[in-house]
Image (cartoon, grey):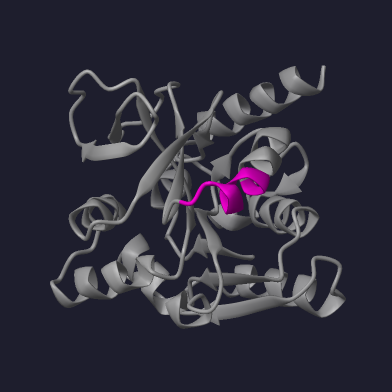
Amino acid sequence: MKFAIIAAGEGSRLAQEGISAPKPLVKVGGEALIERLLRIFHQNGAEETVVVVNKLHPETEAFVRQLKNEGQYGKITLVVQTTPSSMHSFHAISSYLGDAPFCLTTVDTIFREEEFAKYIRDFPNSEADGVMAVTDYVDDEKPLYVATDAEMNITAFNDANCGDQYISGGIYALSPRALVTLHRCMAEGQSRMRNFQRGLIQDGLHLRAYPFSKILDIDHAEDIQKAEAFLAAREG
């Protein structure tokens, strides 16, 4: 199984709040966000991890190249490209993901490692085209609500809460079939990952929801402390 990290955002909100490091290099619990993901993915059997970073942040590129050269996290493929959206970043690395199931996430996703490991172990047995991490913890400015049936099959992605228990956690385990939808969305001028997820439903792919206890994103300076407290509480 392959893994992929979208790390090409500008991190403008963090910069405005006094965080000088590019988002991928922000440390949570003493570990840079991007290295945390590379480590976790390697520990969960990554055949290859594909990373896209922003050309405007050469320090991030240098950091990933050093980890790549050291080899401690297995095979890393690095793409350096400035993109206007997460979907464009996904598209920039899609050519490396067409030959095996893969797990994609953004660089700022914080989750419990043991939950992620179980999620990755369960994915091959799901018989679904995609298994999307979800959580009932809502701490997002614009959450994407996930509608499910009684068997946790996903029936819709909603911008507003339509009685939905879960929101998207921004972690996607997908079969290569999902890339057909990605290319269609790009050809139609779509630019948001939530529209890609809706596109998967429209194209008839079978998606299942996989609950995590909590998933956080690092969008603001205060989120760093929230993430550290979340992870420390588990360790205690």
Q: Nearer the viewer, residue 22 or 169?
A: 169
Residue in the image at 64% along x and 48% along y:
120
Describe residue 93's horizontal placement relative to residue 36 as left or right: left
Q: Quadrant of the N terminus?
A: bottom right
Above or below for 235 versus 185: above
Q: Where is residue 168 in the image (x, y as percent from the top left)?
A: 38, 37
Q: Does the magenta stretch include residue 81?
A: no
Q: Residue at x 18, y 65 (%)?
A: 190
Specify whether 169 is left or right of 198: right
Query: Of residues 155 and 199, which is closer to you in this image?
Result: 155
Residue 127 location, x and y as percent?
48, 51
- Number of numbered discs present? 0
Tell me which secondary structure the magenta stretch mostly adopts: helix
Residue 72's x, y, as percent? 86, 67
Question: Does residue 213 lie above or below 132 as drawn?
Answer: above
Image coords of residue 46 (percent x, y):
71, 64
Asked if residue 17 is positioned above or below residue 185 in the image, the reply reads above
**Which part of the image, by quadrant, shows the C terminus?**
top right
Q: Give the range drawn in magenta.
A: 120-127
Q: Is 74 rendered above or below residue 149? A: below
Q: Where, by quadrant of the figure, is residue 49 drawn?
A: bottom right
Q: Residue at x 41, y 78 (%)?
A: 92
